[in-house]
Image: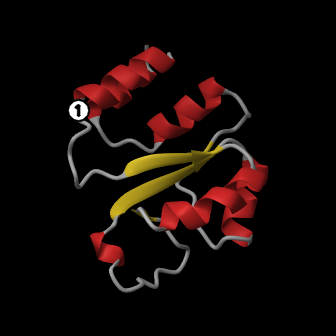
Amino acid sequence: MVWHVACAFLSEGDDDEHEPWWIVFFAPSSASHVVPALRTHFSLSAREPSPSPGENMLRQARLAAIGPTTEAYLREELGLKVDAVAEAPNADSLVIALLGKSTTDQCTALMGE
């Protein structure tokens, strides 16, 4: 299943500079360390948007969490909007969560396979 997802996203043309990147967080502890660095390269989704100077120049990112504990930390402690949450802490659940947030026909078709 993971191979199909990678194939679908790559075939859409990952060079599109306007397409948001997915950033996946696997643990609250790692999130607290990497978010400051990510903010220098990406416009991270905030619960209440308050653009900082130059933020519109950064690449957009969509956020995913491996489970509800990580999602709660991102939302409550870091003030971020999480776009997708895996129901279980495993790769298959993460792929399903990411596909569920995709609007492309290609990825929707793969969900049925």
Q: Secondary structure at mark 1?
A: loop
Establish if 26 lies above or below 10: below
| Above or below, comparing residue 22 to residue 81 in the picture | above
Percent of width and height locating residue 19: 28, 50
Picture residue at 23% right of the left edge, 55% below the top: 18
Q: Which residue: 74% across, 60% down?
A: 72
Compared to residue 10, the image places residue 100 above or below, namely below
- Look at label 1 and name its amino acid: Glu
Q: Quadrant of residue 71?
A: bottom right
Q: Which residue is at a point 74% across and 71% down the rendered structure image?
A: 77
Q: Position of residue 99 (x, y in %)?
A: 45, 35
In the rendered structure, the answer to whether residue 7 lies left or right of residue 67 reads left
Q: Is residue 76 above or below residue 18?
A: below
Query: Measured from the top left, where is residue 102 in percent x and y?
Result: 39, 41
Depth check, front residue: 38 or 90? 38
| Quarter of the picture holding the C terminus | top left
Describe residue 28's horizontal placement relative to residue 66 as left or right. right
- Residue pointed to by mark 1: 12
The one nearer the camera, 112 or 12, is 12
Q: Residue at x 33, y 31 (%)?
A: 9
Q: Is residue 81 visible?
A: no
Crowdedness near tag 1: few (<14), some (14–19) or many (≥20) residues, C-alpha within 10 Å: few
